[in-house]
Image (tube, coloured by chain):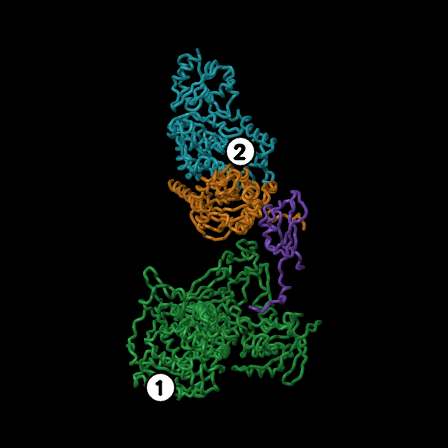
Amino acid sequence: MNEELLHPLEGFLREWMMPHIWCEGCGNGIILNCFAKALSELNLDPNKVVVVSGIGCIGRISGYTNTDSYHTTHGRAIAFAIGAKLAKPELKVVVISGDGDLFAIGGNHFIHAARRNIDIPVICANNFNYGMTGGQYAPTTPLDAWTTTTPYGNIEHPFNLVHLAAASGAVYVARWTTLHVRRLTESIKKALQKEGFSFIEVISPCPELYGRYNQMRTSLDMMSWFKEASEVQHHFDPAKAEITRSKIVLGEFVDIEKPSYGRLLREKIAQIQGKMRGGE
Amino acid sequence: MPLRIWRKPLDADKIKIPQAEIHIIKDRCKGCGFCIEFCPREVLETSEELNVRGVHPPKVKDENKCTLCHFCAAVCPDFAIFSIEKDCGGGC
Amino acid sequence: MQEKPSQPKPNSEEDIRIGVYVCHCGLNIAGSVNAEEVARFAATLPHVVVSKDNRYICSDQGQELIKSDIQEHKLNRVVVASCSPRLHEPTFRRACEEAGLNKYLFEMANIREQCSWVHLYEKEKATEKAKDLVRMAVAKAALLEPEEESEVPIIKKAMVIGGGVAGIQAALDLADTGYQVYLVEKEPSIGGRMAQLDKTFPTMDCSICILAPKMSDAGRHPNIELLTNSEVTEVKGYIGNFRVKVLKKPRHVTEECTACGDCARVCPITTPNEFDVGLATRRAIYTPFAQAVPSTYIIDRNLCLNKENIILCDKCIKACEARAIDFDMKPETVELEVGTIIVATGADVYDPTSLANYGYGKFPNVITSLEFERLINAGGPSGGNLIRPSDMQIPDTVAFIQCVGSRSDKGHLYCSNVCCMNTIKDSLLIKEHWPDTKIHVFYVDIRAYGKGFEDLYKRAKKEGVIFIRGLPSEIHEDRKINNLWLIGENTLQKELYKVNVGMVILSIGIEPRRDNELVQRLLTLSRNPDGFFMEAHPKLRPVDTPTGGVFLAGCAESPKDIKDSVTQASAAAARAGILMAKGRITAEAITPELIAENCTVCGLCARVCPYNAISVDKERKKTEIIEAACAGCGTCGAECPFDALIMRNFTDEQIYAQIDAATEQDADKKIMAFCCNWCSYAGADFAGVSRMQYPTNVRIIRTMCSGRVAPKFVESAFARGTAAVLVSGCHLGDCHYINANYQTKRRVEKLWKKMERLGLNKDRLQLAWFTAAEGEKFASKIKEMQEIVKNVSEEEIEKSKALLAKALPEKD
Amino acid sequence: MTPENRAALTGKHFMNGDFASAEGAIAAGCGFFAGYPITPATEIAERMARRLPEVGGVYIQMEDELGSMAAVIGASYAGVKSMTATSGPGFSLMQENIGLAAMTETPCVIVDIMRGGPSTGQPTMAGQQDVMQAKWGSHGDYEIIALAPSSVQEMFDLTIEAFNLSEIYRVPVMVLADEIVGHMSERLVIPAPEAINVVNRKRPQASPEEYFPFKPDENLVPPMACFGEGYRFYATGLTHDERGRPRTSSAEAQQKLVQRLCDKIRQNTEKIVKIKETMLEDAEVVVIAYGISSRSALSAVRKARERGIKAGLLRLVTLWPFPDNHISEVATRVRAIVVPEMNCGQLVREVERAAKETPVTFLPKLGGEPHRPMEILKAIRRVHS
């Protein structure tokens, strides 16, 4: 076996940033893998793709994708992406960030971007806690779960992210785990081609912190949890899709058509400028 | 159909299933073991050797069993493994 | 529900006028029963105003006689002593009705199947028994009441189980008649066994060429809904109103499939193809064969790398342009409502592996006739070349061995019907392709009974096929070249032979499907000892089953060739069509009548009812019988402690009257047998049909189900001094009333305990299960009980009379 | 997305400062505005909402000022001149990403129409209380540029200037106007587009392979590539090297980067700074003022001259970077310095620092009213005698 041969996805990675900083068995690498795969299968022009991320472990992903990419401040990835996308609509601007970044400090931007139906796919790595800062509880941490800031068990109810996204107006909402790589890749491809705001939640293992505190010491433990608990049910009512230890409903929850902010904006501008020319 | 099926099918030798060539970039591996655990054909196993990171990368147990489903490559968080179709000029 | 009959009920005994007709049935009865004497005796019985004997009372003039007598003598009851009511009761009931007499005022005494035929050599005793049987019938007749039958609508939809040529034919016939048909097939495609065959005898036309058009007709027919890869899991309801659950197993390929085959080409998993009996390879995603209907591919999830919901391999998904692959398909249960069901579940073929002396599974060049079909088929794995698996060479000598798994205690005792002609056809096929091939056929008998069969046989002989009578005792293999030595005796020449051939074809027989037992349970059918489904009557209702609304077609009923299967299928379709055309069916007036003032709403009846046909409302103090759901087994009547349920046409009084009549003379020498209509009474009939002789002292009382037999009947039989009592029904699990016979079992066991407690010999009460085919078993049971009867002492009889006296119905 | 000339206004107009600032932005080639309504800056948003579509630009009203500032950076990185406008409370929220803009060297303009604080304070009244926040508002060391218009005309001119500076130095530039300048209406003359000097960011000369997004030219400012141009660069708010690679624990990298972020402004101060001097040649007393206060100061200086006092006015057009050298030089020529500010003393501290021995008299003013000329005149006379 000659190792000179390059990995088929090598071209989609920013080679001078590799290897990535993520822990052994961290799901972020798999998400990066699936994202790169999606790009290669769609063969989009990488020069027209912008990856925007926020703060947190997965926030580093913008450093690893061989595209234009920007690593914003805590929670602002979506807001930044909106600016970039509206300024240059021909770009594919993708937000990849974590559950804490997108739904705690950045929660406001998420719901409003979904409401506006901005043409941006948002991929959320949900590892149930704040990894980068050492495993504190997040808006997705299950009730009773242990983290470094819920030493007596979590007393906060977690967000059901797919429900939140659907209720906020996203036109495409899906949930997979890092074990369901093929389906995740397909979903990412779909989201990249979808007009409007699409959201993909990726349940991702954090064995070093969340797993360690919650009786899943290794990444394999966490992956087998995903394997046991997951069931695929497309068009399932997102309101009933809370994640529990015994059941994780996966699938495409929402896939609808709705004019996007971008389309309405362009139409509006064309209309106004048309009037002005007519005015002369 | 109750008839016991026991013969080697007549076309058994004619059916060409592509042979795999598995590549492992050892020093990228962080040793999560996903590729070994989730390979549907149990093609891989943990090796004895230590890589630069001090973990045991996977090694190929039986390359002939690989069906080139590429799941190992797809589930690897570290881009450390992939498989390609063996070019054996019709030799295999 | 039940409006009172128009005809005035005879209210006091004076009005009862019974006519008795004793049939000679040529010599069938008269041969061992003195019919005239029986008729003379009948005349002496109470209420009998006319009593005649007649050569063939079932004949037109026989029936005319009854009719005119009804008019002339103002008869209001008719008793015919002849064959089994299971055969001619409908005939005579019709005659009565035509004469304006309610058909429920007719009663039969079975003096043929259950008397003359089983006592061929004891004329006196047989005659005495016949008198008893008539006495019993007359006693019951005196208590018969006119009844009105309630009508139930029939759902004008049919289900055909099994998509082989029989199922397809039945479905097409019904669909063309205009009925909606659900065709349920277990396999991914319809077509069945016939699709595997190369040519068909005797016409030698291409099997798939004539089948494929029918398959696609069935697939395309607007009135046919195909449910392939599906299994019937539950059948509830009754004739005309079945509620069926069918489990549709997921194909994981949607209708979008264009059958282009791109998916299979990339699928990395291979396995031997069942359709080619393992001679060719298929993938995990496949279509069973080129002409499959539906043509949609299917994924074999047992082989596919993708388990649970994780897609490990996505080669087929990627290859499929139609995007028809769907790994998320789940099994779904569809509920159907149909009026009729046709069982065309087909048969299996015999696996000769167990016959070690033929070396199948050991010697590569010993193949089965089914493997031969695939080899000789131009579309088959060898492109139509009859090649030896060992070296892919075409053999210059072959041998056919007949009756492999048939007509032998090694395998099955019955003849599989098709193997002889199939071999002859095969031999001619070989001659046609490779005329110089030397062909030996080792046989027991050649059965070329059908139209054009003998000609084909002659042709084979003319072509030089060598027929040798006497099967080889063993086969040896020549290790070097894998040729085979056949050693045996030519029973015509009375000499040993040792023949060397390049290939041996085992002409394997047909055997019942493994899952017949399941189908039997689902539809409460019965099977013969060989395991094939039983017709309601072997001669007169050959495609009906004992379960109303359910019909048989094809090899499910018995081994048969394509022509017979198709014929039977059309017959079954016609029978089902007749039912549905009527649109309504009259339910026999054998359902219970509730005597509200006796009912305490205790709910015991509801608890034992197999059909949940009784609703008990303790609040509103109301018990209600749902006539449409009731099948009339009478288990409730037997259970009711308060005589609140009258089982019409099988009332307590009528049964007591039969018991009394049967025990009027030397009860202490007699066996009282309670037989259920479907299995044990039919079994007793079958004993008669097969002329099995047994003691004359048994007196059979027919009930619809053994569940009708109330303990008090048994007790009163003993109280009347009967020596022994037999309670019999269908085998547990085969009950025609789902599970009513478990109540029988419970009650008899209780009775045994009681007898023990009272210090009575419990052997005098026997419980036995018979199928309609177990005439032999019935006969030997009676013989066995005869021994018990011999040993019952006077005291024992007296003791039981005394102890059980209170069981007797108080006479006013 | 440069404005079509047809849509750009020219000629004489009568409008308020907020509107003028909006027109300046459009004249400067602004194609993107993200903001959140807040008094007294709302009119800028309203004007932009109406005008941007006409020139093919994009106006979006974000969910808050955090998002507004982030969006402005995003648009700028996508290659479109972008801005926001706000007032004190919103300005505070924007500081987070003003820091990010400084760190990732993002050209962008923030117009802050100052009102009375702290907190919600006096929404409809004028103030000059954000002067220090503009300089020090975000955490860490960095430099920005801040301009202080004192008229409607300057609202127009300095907004253009702000865009030009932000493009030249890849730095957030603030227009610090007070509520009065923002809301008052006066004559505005808009030159023909060709007469307006519009500067655009420096584009990379290097090939995408050799392009390092944070590798400066001799003026310490790196050429800027934008999204979608094939450079496939990476920018992060983390301390990074010239290539953009995060260097979170390298003292050397932090030293190099942060020092340059400051120096690229400091070392160009002379180029950046604008000052207006009136009757300063022979002045013994100088009033140093900016924004609306400078207009009261001007009439105070005139009145002083009528009374025979040699007074002069030094108006700071550029607040940041602070023109230390110039103030020191003037200080050596005068006896006293008077600084009127509509706060409790912010910029005066910078003046005192630069003036060295020369005495500085501070005139604070709170409550939203500007200084009356007489108040300033009194002070002049006091320090003169």
Q: CA distance from mark 2 to mark 1?
A: 126 Å
- Comparing C474 with C642, the one in front is C642
State the image coordinates of residue C181 (x, y, percent, origin top left).
43, 68
Disc number lying in front (2 or 1) = 1
Quick check: marks 2 and 1 in contact, CB under 8 Å?
A: no
At label 2, the amino acid type is: Glu
Compared with residue A173, is residue D240 higher up or lower down, i.e. above or below? above
Answer with left or right where residue C689 lies relative to residue C810: right
Chain appearing in green on the rendered image: C
Seen from the viewer's position, the closer of residues C184 and D176 is C184
Q: Total marks drawn?
A: 2
- Disc 2 residue crowd, few under 14, some 14–19, many 20+, Cα 10 Å: many
Tell me what hue chain A is rendered in. orange
Q: Residues within 10 Å of mark 1 (few under 14, many from 20)?
A: some
Colour seen for chain B: purple
Q: Which element carries disc 2, helix, strand or loop?
A: loop
Visible residue check, residue C171: no
The answer to whether residue A182 is above or below residue D270 is: below
Residue at 47%, 29% (x, y): give it.
D174
User: Looking at the picture, do discs 2 and 1 lie on one chain?
Assistant: no
Residue bearing mark 2:
D105
Asked whether the viewer can see residue C578, the reply is yes
Where is mark 1, residue-wise?
Answer: C43
Name chain D's colour: cyan
User: Which chain hosts label 1?
Assistant: C
Residue C802 in the image, given as x and y percentages of width and height = 41, 74
Name the side, left or right, on which A28 lies relative to C701.
right
Pick the front one: C213 or B1: B1
Element under label 1?
helix
Amino acid residing under circle 1? Ala
